[in-house]
Structures are given as C-alpha cells and as structure tokens.
Image (tube, rainbow, N blue to C red):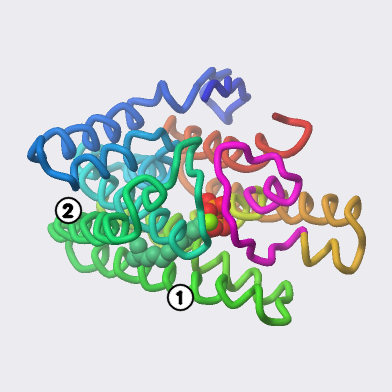
Amino acid sequence: MLFEWAKQDSGYGKIMMRVEDFEEYRQINLALAGLIHKMDESSQMKKILNHVCSSGGKKIRPLILMLSTEVCGGDMNKSIDAALAIELIHSASLIHDDLLDGGILRRGMPSAHEKYGVAAALLCGDFLISKAITLISSYGHDAVYEFGSAGMYMAEGETIDIKSVNEEFRQKNYFDCINKKTASLFASSAAIGAYIAGCSKDEALRFHAFGENVGIAYQIVDDLLEFLEELEDKKSTQESVTLPQIFNRALGREEAVKRTIAEVYRYVGFAKDLLSTFRPCPAREKLLLITDYITVDLLPGKI
Ligand code: FPP
Ligand code: MG
C-alpha cells in the first residue's frame, strides 16, 4: 500500500501523508496486535484470528472513528478500544460475507473458511463480534446504540444483497443495500468518534452523514472495480447485482462506467461538504485525504 498523498489543504499548507504514517494507524495496529498476542498460543482461534487480522486491511473505519474524536476536540487515546471494536466487527462481517457469497480470496489470501473450514470461520466471526461488544461496552449509551444499529443494518443489507441475484434489482434497491451493508458501519464509526469526544447531537448526526456518504462512494468504487475486473486481491464465486451492472443493462458499458464514476463524485462531494462544516484542523485534513484515498484515488486511470 504505497499511495503517496500530496494535497493542498485548507489552512495547514501543503501536507504529504500516507495512511501508514498516521499516528492513529500505528495505534490501531498496535491495539489489534496486542489483542491477538494476549491469546493462548495453542488456541485454534488465535490461528484463525492471526490469519484474518494480519492480512493487511487499510483500517479505514477505525481511523474515521479516531479522527472524528479528534475533530470534536477529544483525545484519540480514549477512542482506541471503540476503534478496535469497529475493526473487529468489520473483520467478522468480511468472514461472514465470504461464507455468504463464496469468497475464496480476501486481501490476497485464502478466505477464512477456505483455509480453516466453514465451522471455524463462523465461530471466529462469533468470537470477533463478542469481543467487539466487550470493547464498546464502556462507552455509554449513544456509542453502544450506534454500534448495535450498525451490526443490524449490515446484516439487513446482506439479506438484500443475497436476494439481488434472484430479483429485479434496481438502483433504489442497490442504494438501499449498500447503505445498509457498507455505509452503516462508516456512519456509525464517525458518529461514535464524535460521541466519545462529548460532542452535540447535531455534530454526531453530521459525522454520521459524512461517514454514510463516504461509505456509499467507497462501495460504488469497489463494485466498479469488480465490474471492470480490476480487483486482484479478492475473488468470490457468487456475484451480486451492482450499480455499473444496472447501468450497463440499459446504457452499455462505456456509459455505465461514466455514470457510475459520476455517482462516486456526487457522494464524495456530499461527504466533503459535510466535513467542511467542522473546524479546520489536522484531523479534518486526514479525514479529507481518507475520503479521496478510498474513493476517487482508486478510480480507473488513477491507479
Ligand atoms: C462486503 O460486500 C460485505 C459487507 C460490506 C458487509 C457484510 C455484512 C454481513 C455479512 C453482516 C454481518 C453482521 C455482523 C454484525 C458482523 P461485498 O461482497 O460487496 O464486498 P467484497 O467484494 O469485499 O466481498
Ligand atoms: Mg463479498
């Protein structure tokens, strides 16, 4: 992962950053490594967790949480457990997603169930969700409620995703699906980060909306790259119906790609507008960079 960032920010001069150089990135990786390290060496669960959690991953959701805390004037160190909880539930969702859509390759490695079998993968997902609950439990009602809601939305989104192969699946269904299965966790990550800093309800809602729009844009890009067969580090045996496919049916490939990219920019625009309502600070700049990093920077021609 060597994406150089050189962007003009709004008040902090020219900044050169890579996500791997963020202090928040270092902290979340340390926390994750610490969690695995503490487990009994001989346990089978440790082996599967190592496989799942040490396979890279950009840690975008926990970063969004920690940076939202900072933008709201809070201490990033107080949000690490919550950020870890978010990363763990995300990892669980990928294990379960691979079980559901026949994922065989994830982050360039065999999926958990390919390597360890369905039962072990399922149980690893259960373990991760449970551990995540213990980590989030000390953060108070608003954060815990957000966390639980995200999990419910993700599962509901997956039910829509699964049905997408069998039904007449239109744009409206697609957006409902990705909003729930993907954007909900981005949205809750941002809102939880804000709640941890003790921000107002209005600020938390704006952070929630920011995360939601980034999450939607991110999933559209992911679906576009899959449509263009440009994703080499993951592979599934079952395909869902996605936005570029919906456009392709009606308009042909070239126009489908154009329209899909236009949607990405639209949601990135919403996200950036929301971000601009917060006080300018280095953490806000990092959120701005992350927004591009996981969306427009990955578009064809920019890779
Ligand atoms: C990836 O979709 C999958 C998700 C974004 C969400 C999966 C959610 C669940 C299985 C529900 C789990 C619920 C809890 C509480 C853990 P994709 O198949 O389009 O992306 P991919 O190409 O990365 O596989
Ligand atoms: Mg999948």
User: Residue at image x 26%, y 54%?
Assistant: 124
Residue at the disc numbered 1:
156
Rendered location of residue 129, percent (x, y): 25, 60
User: Residue at image x 50%, y 35%?
Assistant: 108
Rendered location of residue 78, percent (x, y): 19, 42
Q: Is residue 72 visible to the viewer in this orientation of the structure?
A: no
Q: What kind of element bears circle 1?
A: helix
Q: Residues within 10 Å of mark 2 (few under 14, many from 20)?
A: some
> Which quadrant of the structure image shows residue 26?
top left
Q: Amino acid at mark 2?
A: Leu
Residue at the disc numbered 2:
135
The C terminus lies in which quarter of the figure? Answer: top right
Q: Amino acid at mark 1?
A: Glu
Q: Are marks 1 and 2 in contact (CB under 8 Å)?
A: no
User: Residue at image x 51%, y 53%?
Assistant: 103
Q: Is residue 270 above or below residue 18?
A: below
Q: What kind of element bears circle 2?
A: helix
Rendered location of residue 216, percent (x, y): 59, 58
Question: Residue 243 or 203: which is nearer the viewer?
Answer: 243
10 displayed left or right of 82: right
